[in-house]
Amino acid sequence: MLTTIKSKDMKVTVCARGAELQSIQSSDGTEYLWQGDPAYWTSHAPNIFPYVARLTDGKFLHKGSTYGFGNHGLVRYAELAVVERSQDSVTYELVSDENTLRQYPFAFRYTMRYRVNGNRLEMQTTVENTGSERMYFAVGGHPGFNVPLENGLSFSDYVIEFDEPADPYRIKLADSGAVTPGQERYALEESRRIRLSHSLFDHDAIVLHHMAKKVTIKAETGSRSITVCYPDFRYLGLWHKPKTDAPYLCVEPWTSLPSREGIVETLALQSDLLFLDPGKRYQTAWWIEITG
């Protein structure tokens, strides 16, 4: 089921499956969100919970038992219920059940709220531990954006510009997408910019740590841009399908990292995961702004 919310400046459509964004349009009908061309990548903007990216061998351990789920967790594959809706906002909910507990042994309530406010799409994620033991998890987003945004421009005309100088580190990833030991400084042009080229992603995602908390995709000669702000997230992934000329860019705020190479993780021992004790709640917010 699709739900559309809007303001005078933008219209947003969301699907109940995964509570996934399907469209972000400006008032003149320009589409900013990647539309899932199967030649490159069929998704639009998966929501990430309770794990980021890949588990080694698709598995993790908890209290001596083995569990597992697909890439980026449970939510992206589930049908979520609409629990609140208005002209400018919609809230989706996923509650743990027998199916989720077979894959992830924690009782939870996950909600995703979208609200349009002028030219800004605000997103609020809430996770509640409804069980009787400490739960371990991650959250994140994976929106893909059309690049270029205007006729006459190309992918390489665009830059990723952080709102303040940064000296980030790049997380090392194996060919499998798993984390490998060590980090390396990732040089930014003038400490703020990355110039886009398709070859940037020949070795999969660029995952940064210690970076600024707001980034804009823009072209110096263009009038349209996209800004993503993610104040509570520790990592930022930048990606398109490797070794292609894919005309999109994913901007992915993550709270945590994927599994380490060759290690089936024990969630309670993975140091960068979030955790909640019984009855507690976690909430975070981030947003996307469009201009032009």
Image: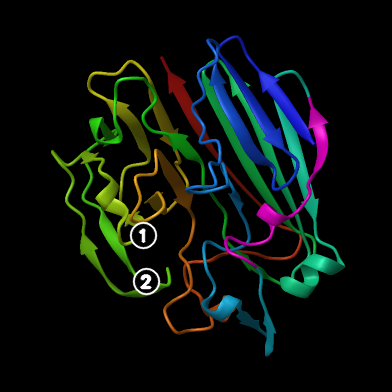
- Name the foreground residue: 274 vs 123: 123
Dot 1 falls on a residue whose secondary structure is loop
Mark 1 residue crowding within 10 angstroms, few (<14) / some (14–19) / many (20+): some
**Left or right of 241, for residue 157:** left
Q: How is the image coloured?
A: rainbow
Asked whether 154 falls inside the magenta stretch, the response is no
Residue 213 image-quadrant placement: top left
Q: Amino acid at mark 1?
A: Asp
- Name the foreground residue: 178 vs 111: 178
Which residue is tagged 1? Answer: 204
Q: Measuring 45% from the left and 41% from the top, which residue is drawn there? A: 230
21 in relation to 38, above or below: above
> Start and end of the magenta stretch?
70-85
Which residue is tagged 2? Answer: 175
Q: Are marks 2 and 1 in contact (CB under 8 Å)?
A: yes
Residue 3 in picture, x, y percent from top left: 75, 29
Mark 2 residue crowding within 10 angstroms, few (<14) / some (14–19) / many (20+): few
Nearer the N terminus, badge 2 or badge 1?
A: 2
Q: Amino acid at mark 2?
A: Asp
Residue 31 in picture, x, y percent from top left: 52, 24
Q: Measuring 78% from the left and 74% from the top, which residue is drawn there? A: 102
Dot 2 falls on a residue whose secondary structure is loop
For the N terminus, the quadrant is top right
Residue 105 in picture, x, y percent from top left: 74, 73
For the C terminus, the quadrant is top left
251 in relation to 75, above or below: above
**Which residue ends up furthest to the front in the rendered image?**
39
92 in relation to 151, above or below: below
Mark seen at residue 55: none
139 in relation to 69, above or below: above
